[in-house]
Structure formats: C-alpha cells, structure tokens
Image (spheres, rainbow, N blue to C red):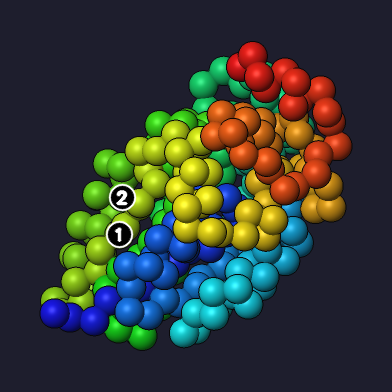
Amino acid sequence: MSRLNSIVLVSGGMDSLVTAAVAVQESDAVNFLHITYGQRTQEAERRCFHKLVEFYEPADSMIVDISYLRQMGGSSLTDPALKIQQFGESRGIPNTYVPYRNGNFIAIATSWAEIIVANRIYIGAVEEDSSGYPDCRESFFQAAEETINQGTRDDTGIKIITPVIHMEKSEIVKLGERLQVPFESSWSCYKYNDVACGSCDSCVLRIRAFQKAGLKDPLPYRSKISWEACTDI
C-alpha cells in the first residue's frame, strides 16, 4: 500500500479544522497549507492557523500570499468599499463570494503536492449547508481532480478529498466533537479579527450549527440577538 502523504488547506475556519482532523486520522503524514488573499479577517485566520500547526504538528506547513485577489476585488471579503451582508440579506450568491477562490487554492496545493510527492489534497468545502458558492460544489472538485491529472506528471495521482462536503454544519460540529478538535482555535466571522460579529452569514451558520448540535460554541460574539434569532432560522 502506498504511503498517504496529504496536503490540507487550512483556512482557520471551522470546516477546514474538522477536515484537518480527518486528514490527520487518515494519512501517514499531513502538511498544512494556509492561503491569505487580502481578506478582511486574514489576521484572525492566520492566528488560528498557527495555533492549529502547534496543535497537530504537521510534517510541514506553509503560508502563501495571493493578495492579487484583493487587487481584483469583486467580493465584500476583499473590497472594503463593499458592505458585508447580514444573514438573510442576499438573494442568490452573496457578495462574500470570492470569484474562483477555491480554484486558486487547489492550483497552489497541487504545485506543492508535486514537489513534496503528496497524493491527497484535503479541503473543507461544504455544498449543502453553505452560502451557495459555486466553487464549493462536488462537481467542481471532480472536474478539478481531472484537470490535475491532465496537468501533472503521469505518476502523480493526486486525489482531492472533501470529507465534509455533504454534511450539515451541525453534523460537522458533532464530528469535530468526536475528533476532539480545538474549536476555540477556529474563526468564522467575515467582518472582524477580534470578536466575531454574530450577524454575517458565516457567524450565523456557525451559531446555528452549535445550537442544533447541542454543544457550546467557545467563541464570544458581539451580538447576542443573533444567538436568539438563530433558533428560529
């Protein structure tokens, strides 16, 4: 049996944290990759990444800066002129979508995978209970894997692994609890780097997930109203 050497895209978010824990269990060696792209909360996300590197002690870790995504704009996560929508304000794909972000991430992970002879790329994308980003669909990752096979050496054989892609957020929380992940070392807020807002899409989805799972979210929030409103969403 070939050795499973994996790259894990670790954003610092809850979904990538649980995905990292799964990768650690399933792999002979893991390598953590964090990509910063000029997003509003890059400070908090990078802080979480460092904590997770310390917690899981991967074989190697790397931070890659692709701030050209901020230069391009087109998303409220990278363009300060755009207002981040509150939960429920958007119709269709919310303005927090960063065009083709996961495509950029997968490409970078593939380059590193070829260099260190890794055969798996783990990413914590969620299709069914997320904000509807098109680059979080399973079909996208299937197509990306085929592209990798076409664009790398014949003996590379890289697989894209998406262990939480069909889970509800509450199921991800429960899985994380079973795997004893440090949820306090993850960040979901789209707005702030210090105390989470509690009202953006990502915060509300996280709050609802912990409530539905019957577990306490270790992160504090600025708005207690969102905790109460979340019960009825």
Q: Which residue is mark 2?
A: 141
Locate residue 153 relative to residue 28 in the image: left or right: left
Q: Position of residue 106 (x, y in %)?
A: 40, 61
Residue 87 lies, in percent from the top left, at: 67, 24
Residue positioned 62% across, 31% down in the render: 211
Q: Position of residue 184 (x, y in %)?
A: 69, 56
> Which quadrant: the N terminus?
bottom left
Circle 1 SS class: strand
* Residues at circles 1 and 2 in contact by the CB criterion of under 8 Å: yes
N-terminal of the two: label 1 or label 2?
Answer: 2
Amino acid on which the number 2 mark rests in the picture = Phe
Q: Is residue 37 visible?
A: no
Disc on res. 160: 1
**Foreground residue among 214 and 36:** 214
Residue at screen point 72% across, 48% down: 218
Residue placed at 51% from the left, 71% from the top? 33
Q: Looking at numbered disc 1 in the image, what kind of residue is underneath it?
A: Ile
